[in-house]
Each structure stands twice: as structure tokens, then as C-alpha cells.
Image (tube, grey):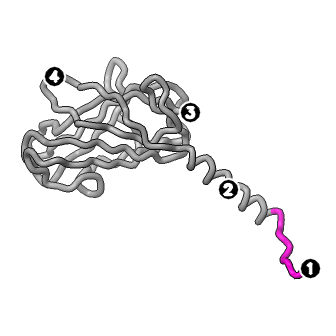
Amino acid sequence: MVYGFKMITSGTLLTLLLVSLASVTRASVKTETLPFWECSSDVPVPTSVTLECESLVNGICLLRKGQTHQLKAEFTPGVSTSTKLQSYVAWKRWVEMPIPGQDSGACDNFVKCPLTHGTRSIFKYPLEIQNFWMRRRYPMVWRLTDDATHRDVFCFIIRIQII
């Protein structure tokens, strides 16, 4: 003890600094309403889509590697569904390429099932941006599909940029 205070080791100081930096970095993330597009004219789209972004530039949500960003889609299903829905997210270029490591069981944690025709619902999904993803712009397609009928409950396309 020196003058009644404990000495702080360099390891403790480094840990405090890293925790402070992480909270400052995360504090800059805000929820943005995103522009979105339909996948096709015969598949419903949500009424609104929001995502936690570092910033929104020209309709593109900037997402930081190594962080989880909360996606929220509000929608009113046109049909009642079974108790098992699948969430599917993919990069959309010439073909759809599924994004690795995403949880597809929608009813487990992301939306209250079964869905009832005409009743407003909310789909919330923690989109984890892996460190190995390339820094670039990506159009993403997101589908929520009923397992029993294989029909899309909704489908939309958003644009993100990994930073």
C-alpha cells in the first residue's frame, strides 16, 4: 500500500483500458431504420426493418467485425403458421450464399410462434459479424419460412458494409 491506495498492476490497468475502449466503441452503435427491398413480388415484406449500425450511409448499414448487431423486422403475416419457422440469411450477388454460423431456428428465440394471420409480429435476431468476414459491401437477403408449408412468411433485402 502506498498512501492508503492499492498499487495497480500493468495487467489490471490494461484490462481497465480495454473494457473502457470496448464500451466507448459499443456506445457509438445506434439503431437505424433501414431501406429494404422485396425479394419478389409474390413474397410479403415486413412493414419496417431496423438494425444496430455504426452509422447509416446512403442506405447502407455499417457493421463492425467481431460484434453482434440486433436486427428487428416488424411484420403482419398474411397466413397463420406452424410452430416451426426457419430464418435464412444470405449474401445476395448473382446467387444466394448462406452466411455461415447463423442460427436458423426462428421460433426458438427470435419470434413468438405460431404466427397468427393478420396479427402484428416482431422478429428479433442477433446478427453476429465474424472476424473472418471480408470488409466490403453486401446485399443481404433475409427469409422467414414456415417448415410445414415451405412458404415464405416474409423476405427482404438490405445492404450492409462490413468495417
Give the dominant element type of the magenta stretch: helix, strand or loop: loop
Mark 3 residue crowding within 10 angstroms, few (<14) / some (14–19) / many (20+): some
* Amino acid at dot 4: Ser
**Looking at the image, which residue is at 54% across and 38% down?**
132
* Amino acid at dot 1: Tyr
Image location of residue 133, percent across then percent down: 51, 35
Mark 2 residue crowding within 10 angstroms, few (<14) / some (14–19) / many (20+): few
Image: magenta residue range:
1-10
Q: Which residue is mark 2?
A: 20
- Quarter of the N terminus within the rendering: bottom right
Q: Earlier in the sequence, mark 1 or mark 2?
A: 1
Which element carries disc 2, helix, strand or loop?
helix
Mark 4 residue crowding within 10 angstroms, few (<14) / some (14–19) / many (20+): few
Q: Earlier in the sequence, mark 2 or mark 4?
A: 2
Q: Which mark is residue 123?
A: none
Residue 107 in which image quadrant = bottom left
* Amino acid at dot 3: Ile
**Looking at the image, which residue is at 63% across and 50% down?**
24
Q: Which residue is mark 1?
A: 3
Spatial CA distance of label 3 from label 2 is 21 Å
Q: Which residue is mark 4?
A: 41
Image location of residue 41, percent across then percent down: 16, 22
Which element carries disc 4, helix, strand or loop?
loop
Spatial CA distance of label 4 from label 3 is 32 Å
